[in-house]
Amino acid sequence: MVYESQAEAYDRFRELFGNTPGFVAGTDPGDVPDSFRVEAAPDSVSAIDAALDGLSGIDRVVAEPVRTP
């Protein structure tokens, strides 16, 4: 598990959505929250989601597909 600051999350957002400049331009750094990032095997995602659901301080759990370079 890795902590991702708001600035790091915004940088990742800009990288992910760089091909939609209007979307990026309309999003301020403060619009993207800080987060914790976890890399997990696909068959573990449901268990991780269930374990974190409802914990104080967690707004939501988002599963993203693994990006390959």
Image (cartoon, rainbow, N blue to C red):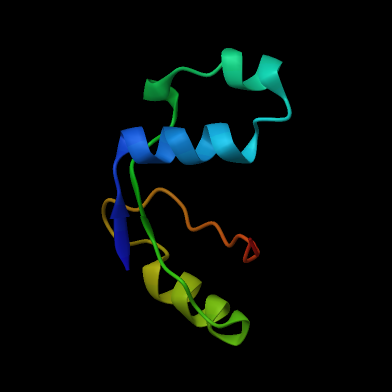
Residue 43 horizontal side relative to residue 60, left or right = right
Picture residue at 46% right of the left edge, 52% below the top: 60
Q: Is the residue 47 above or below the residue 39 in the image?
A: below
Quadrant for residue 63, please give it: bottom right
The residue positioned farthest toward the front in the image shown: 69
Figure label count: 0
The answer to whether residue 39 is above or below residue 47 is: above
**Percent position of residue 29, x then y:** 40, 23
Q: Nearer the viewer, residue 52 or 29?
A: 29
What residue appears at the point 59 percent right and 14 percent down from the top-left corner?
Answer: 25
Kindly identify the residue that appears in the image at 65 percent across and 34 percent down.
17
Horizontally, residue 19 falls left or right of residue 56, namely right
User: Which image quarter: residue 26?
Assistant: top right
Q: Is residue 17 above or below residue 2?
A: above
Residue 57 lies, in percent from the top left, at 27, 51
Residue that sits furthest to the bottom in the current view:
43
Q: Give left or right: position of 67 versus 62.
A: right
**Percent position of residue 36, x then y:** 34, 56
Tell me the quarter of the picture where residue 42 sits: bottom right
Q: Return the x and y of residue 2 as percentages of the image width and height.
A: 31, 62
Residue nearest the observer in this picture, 26 or 12: 12
